[in-house]
Amino acid sequence: MRRAAAGFTIIELLIVLIIVGILATVAAPNLRDFVVRNRLKTAASDLHFALAFARSEAIKRNAAVTVEHNGGDWTQGWLVKAGPDTLSAQDPYAQIVITTRNAAYGSKTFSAITFSGTGREGSSDGVAFIIATAEYPMIPARCVVLDPSGRPTVRQDKNGNSSDGCNI
């Protein structure tokens, strides 16, 4: 008596491969958006932490602490400094664009943010960091807004136009 061969037929294998291909095609754009959104969230969280850390150190030391970009702009990362000492450093982010404005979203750029010993930020009108990606403009920007009192907050762009900041 002959036994039937165990295993898959070539037709069954092709059908499974076609189904997997269709599922991968549908899932790939959503996965890309997920990765980009998380990259923006991470950059905003890291910048928020650096600003809060600098403010805390300024109050603790009762001395000026500065957050400055590391290179040509904020996209290249940043440093938290107390005098000549570097307290913290952030590496650059890939495919992220970080621009600065004043808190009213006027076109004012900042190369450094200085907290006084009281924890207040040096400029009178606050600072907004707009964190976006140029490759995927449909993904909302994140903003880290630093009010004149020195408290940072994170916002998400609500109108889909990162050029005007994160207006709600």
Image (cartoon, rainbow, N blue to C red):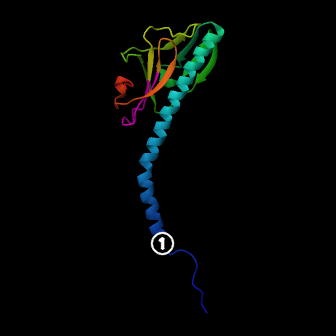
Q: Residue at x 46, y 38 (%)?
A: 36
Location of residue 137 with respect to 146 vertically, above or below: below
Q: Position of residue 9 (x, y in %)?
A: 50, 75
Specify whether residue 114 is in view: yes
Residue occupying the far bottom of the picture:
1
Is residue 48 found left or right of 165 in the rendered image? right
Density class for disc 1 (Cα within 10 Å; few <14, some 14-19, many ≥20) is few
Q: Main secondary structure of the magenta part?
A: loop
Q: Position of residue 17 (x, y in %)?
A: 47, 64
Location of residue 127 with respect to 16 vertically, above or below: above
Specify whether residue 92 is in view: no
Look at the image and say whether residue 137 sits in the magenta stretch: yes
Q: Quadrant of the N terminus?
A: bottom right
Magenta residues?
130-144
Q: Residue at x 41, y 53 (%)?
A: 26
Q: Which residue is mark 1?
A: 12
Q: Position of residue 142 (x, y in %)?
A: 44, 29
Give the image quarter of residue 88.
top right
Location of residue 4 with respect to 115 vertically, above or below: below
Location of residue 90 with respect to 107 vertically, above or below: below
Q: Residue at x 40, y 33 (%)?
A: 140
Q: Amino acid at mark 1?
A: Glu
Look at the image and say whether residue 74 sits in the magenta stretch: no
Q: Residue at x 46, y 8 (%)?
A: 123
